[in-house]
Amino acid sequence: MSKDEEKLAATDSQEVVEDLVSDEGIQTNEAELEALLESVSVDASEQADTKNWQLEAETLAAQVNDLTDQAMRAKADAQNARRRAEQDVEKAHKFALEKFAKELLPIIDGLEKAVEAEVATGNEMTTLREGVEMTLGMFLSSVQKFQLAQVDPVGHPFDPALHEAMAMVDAPDSEPNTVIAAMQKGYTLNGRLIRPAMVMVSKGSSKVDQQA
């Protein structure tokens, strides 16, 4: 074989090899591309599933928070309702006797007036007077057991929350705005005023609020 023939054969062989390599390379690239596309498709699907799961988890978390808030509000409402009910029951127990107590006050007033009248006459102690005083004492002792307390304001400063001023008089021996006489004693039930004391107040430089 001449040198020219050898060069020609070598050239043809190189071209054939290059063609094969080129075809295989293309096939290899196509296979890799398909694998890459499949991988990208799988990754996208997984990402979509993950995103959907995250959205569902966030939705469930929001619903749980809402239900928790509703449960807490319901619990607070129930506690407030129970507290109000307990307070109402307590008030009912404390002041259930208020109407009855007011009906007793004129009886106490009458016994006190009877004793005061006997004392004002200057007569000696009689059996009747002693009986009236004993009855009055027992009566007051009994009502005090039910938290009915007498407001005897004589000698105390005028208090519009407890007293009702009927008149203001000159009283040089008393401090201004001091109660010097009670025309009718006041009463409280469990600390709440059910009848103000009707009083006479000494004059002074300060004005007395006559609204009890």
Image (cartoon, rainbow, N blue to C red):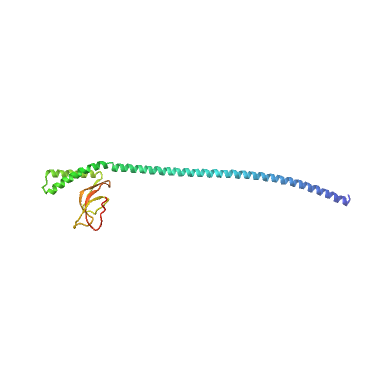
User: Where is residue 177 shown, x and y percent of the image?
Assistant: 23, 55
User: Where is residue 197 shown, x and y percent of the image?
Assistant: 23, 49
Residue 144 in which image quadrant: top left
Q: In the current view of this chain or complex, which residue is farthest to the right?
A: 2
Q: Residue at left 45%, top 43%?
A: 70
User: Where is residue 52 shown, x and y percent of the image?
Assistant: 57, 43
Q: Residue at left 79%, top 47%?
A: 19
Residue 44 in which image quadrant: top right
User: Where is residue 8 shown, x and y percent of the image?
Assistant: 85, 50
Q: How many marks?
A: 0
Residue 178 placement, left or right of 129:
right
Comparing 33 with 14, the one in front is: 33
Q: Residue at left 49%, top 43%?
A: 64
Residue 192 placement, left or right of 50:
left
